[in-house]
Image (spheres, rainbow, N blue to C red):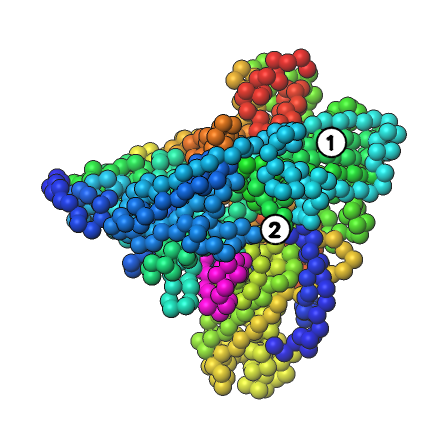
Amino acid sequence: MARRAATRSAKSPAARHVTQIELELNGRVTRASVPDHWTLLEFLRKSAGLTGAKEGCNAGECGACTVLLDGVAVYACCVLAAETSGRRVMTIEGLGTPERLDPLQEAFLADDALQCGFCIPGQILAAKALLDAEPSPDRECVRRALSGNLCRCGCYVKIATAVLRAAAARREPER
Amino acid sequence: MSDDCAEKTVETELEIEGRKVKVRAQMERQLPPWGKTTLVGKSLRRVDGPDKVTGAARYTHDVQLPGMLYGKVLRSPHARARVAELGLSAAAKLPGVLAVLGPGDVRGVRLGGREVLSAEASYAGEEIAALAATDEETAEEALSLIRVRWEPLPHVLEPEDAMAPGAPALQPGGNVLGGGFGPQTPGKPEVYERGDAPAALEAAEVTLERIYETPAAQHACLETHGAVAAWDGDGLTVWESTQGVFFVRSALCEALGLPASRVRVLCPFMGGGFGSKNSADRYTLLAALLARRSGRPVRMVLSRREDFEAGAYRPASRQQLAIGLTRRGRIVALTSRAVNPVGSALEGHYFGSCVGPVQDFYSCANVRTENYAILTSSPPPSAFRAPGHVQGAFALEQLVDEAADELGLDPVRLRLANLSANDPDSGLPYASNGLASCLRLGAKAIGWDSRKPPRTKTGRFRSGLGVAIATWGAGGGPPAVAQIVLHEDGSVVVLTGACDLGTGTRTVMTQIAAEELGVAVSAVLVANGDTRTTPYCLPSFGSLTVASTGPAVRLAAAEVKRQLLDAASPILGAPASSLLVMRGKVRHAVTGKSVAVASIAASLPARMIVGTSQRGPNPDGVVLASFSAQFAQVEVDCRFGTVRVKRFVSAHDCGRVLNPATWSSQIQGGVLQGIGYALLEQRTRDPGTGRQLNAGLLDYKIPTVLDSPPEIEVIDAAPPYPANNIGAKGSGEPPIIPVAAAIANAVANATGRRLRTAPITPARLLAALSAEP
Ligand code: FES
Ligand code: FES
């Protein structure tokens, strides 16, 4: 668990207390020292160099920052980085790469379930949490599970279709 | 450029956001329409999709540079106030703060006629001071150390108050001006007139007069507005979440006195614009100024609250409409008197207009519109997806339905009977017009024939069907330049200034170039939205990108192909006219003898072929417009006053559909924003302070997936469109225009009650249900 080392930073009055954390980030054990008040989203974006989780509101209102914490979809802007020590975090970068896509990412492309793309990492991870827990959802179930992820481009119909497609692909991996 | 017509320029007209403008254009080489296509018209997957679904796409928010500072802005907490004293020194002394700017430090740096920092705030949220620090927390703390002595001034938020006698004059000419795009005369509306509407109304067999109101609605792009600025000597590089890198560049050059060659603006990915990101804003200039002062790159990204409070919005409207008809349902007169509150807009800004639909949806000889802009203590409004027409259609398309009810006529039939073969304003024919097919195909898809009158409906849940239409100038036009480079290995780069807002610009430009050149999609890379490397075009606004840049890309590809065939001719020992390009090979049409594109390019002295072309003029004597008819099926819960959109059908004529997948995504997105506008969205403010009460995504309600119908059926009802070489018109804005009216009409069909104020909230619906019909 976290070894808490409260140190005073000489550099900046705002970065006062720092905590050492050790977490499993996208499958890799990662150690870092983070300001106590930093959210997981700040840690990912500013320190870990993972910008796939987006900041749409920083207040738990949009879902653009959705990541998986021990397999559960959470708003990274509403979790303190210090709380993640000893836990598993997956961001969109840990799911697949442009060369090796996860079936969910593949399905979003196949159904064109994206426009500007800003909400999409969050949508995909919220969908992954759903499918890991419920491999055979119906459309209404998908809609409820994704209702905490806003898309201003209005991709909702195709996103639900893509998640259903991915669910089918995961149940029966082809070939 | 080898075009023999390169010298000739002509004047041509294009329509941008409902406004017709004249520009010069160079004559273009005429290309025959495509015959059978192999790529265009196919649902090619988004070429930038893999980057977007893996988090590899880098948006402006994601730009991180070594030594980058975080910029923050001090904003006015008052709706109108003078800064009597400003104390910046405590903030400047805070360790970690590297630059602080007040109005006195940036005097003369102007954007859209305004100083970039104000010593007198005209709205709550206006920028007063700015600073940059090594981290966000230090910047926030520094803001709290700025001392301001405010002298509050009387403010007005609502147009009625701004027009009342004794209201404080917000600008020297008074608070009442003409709407539209100016020039405005103080105290006078913008007037449009054809025929004699007052007399025709007087003489009409049936007349109706109604008032409709619409709210201030906000874009709420998921990526908030923002820029990152970095200097390198006297050169400036700016990443901006924008629809138009060249407009951002010219705003920066003008404000900072820099040559265009020294300013580079880039936007590789952006998280939504919808009209709110057409050019630079104050944060752009402040990022550049703070970066110059501190000698470090500066990131200036608005918080969600700032994005709402100081940001863009569709102005509200109050529209008084009248319609005159014959008993048989022929529209003979239309009038509108519209009031648009435009905040602190300055002369020359967008002044709001919602009278367009009354002028151009129907064949009607007698039309008069009066358009007022009212100044208030609010931010200036901005374009928002089909500016004006969304408000105007909410009014007109309900009025037409009310007239159908009055006359006992079917709303679809009434509309069909009053469609205009020619543009009602100019009398000129449309280059193509599929509106009647949109209505017929849409009605069939939604099951219009099963529509029952409201009196047959009882019980708590009542279902209804509604329809509404749209016309929108979406033919695009110059300026739009494209350059295509065929490299020595046969790979191709398409350079265009057009930003991809998520509409699929990169993907359809890939299709156009690959189709015309005869090479594989995988050989083509579209590089776009970078003022240093890509040629000029207008911002991605006004539904014009495909119809402006698309033809230029096809021309550039044709030019590259011409050079390629000329080079292949001696190799294959056949005239260029007998050769064609297929699957990456130049082939003789008869003998089948072929040579790879790559080996031709590599054999050239230059080792490359470059083709540059520009969008030519629009044809004279025709009007270019896209059309749409939309149908909503709603279920009203009469106990709670809620409306669910159960089904939606969206039929369009926007010419050739280049990519059905990206196209239908854009249409569905427009419908979703229309559903928000109809049922959920409105900016609300504290009248006492003028501050926004719902400046967040929890309280300013944009649709969630649960507000979306499970399916949105999209129908292509386009006849061939001959007015440009790719046969396509714009489709970005038409899908939002009729949505709110179609829903309101469906609610009326379900309940027998007219909701003439948007959004149709449960409170409004319950009030209407409890009133006498
Ligand atoms: S950024 Fe976390 S919910 Fe919006
Ligand atoms: S794709 Fe743009 S916000 Fe969802």
Q: Nearer the viewer, residue B521 or B322?
A: B322
Q: Nearer the viewer, residue B21 or B656?
A: B21
| Residue type, mark 1 in image | Leu
Instruction: Name the residue rendered at 64%, 17% in the picture.
Output: B457
Q: Nearer the viewer, residue B11 or A168?
A: B11
Q: Is residue B268 above or below residue B224?
A: below
The image position of residue B730, as x and y in percent, is 62, 52
Compared across the picture, whether A27 is left or right of B725 comes to left
Magenta-colored stretch includes residue B179? no
Secondary structure beneath dot 2 equals loop
Q: Is residue B93 visible?
A: yes
Residue B742 appears in which quarter of the rendering? top right
The residue singled out by tag 1 in the image is: B321
Comparing marks 2 and 1, which lies closer to the viewer? 1
Q: Are marks 2 and 1 in contact (CB under 8 Å)?
A: no
N-terminal-most mark, 2 or 1 = 1
**Tags 2 and 1 on a common chain:** yes
Mark 2: few/some/many CA within 10 Å (<14, 14-19, 20+): many
| Residue type, mark 2 in image | Gly
Compared across the picture, whether B449 is left or right of A6 comes to right
Question: Magenta residues?
Answer: B246-270
Which chain is disc 1 placed on?
Answer: B
Compared across the picture, whether B544 is left or right of B699 comes to right
Q: Is residue B34 above or below residue A77?
A: below
Residue at mark 2 to residue at mark 1: CA–CA distance: 26 Å
Instruction: Specify the label residue B542 is tagged with.
Output: 2
The image position of residue B609, as x and y in percent, is 52, 77
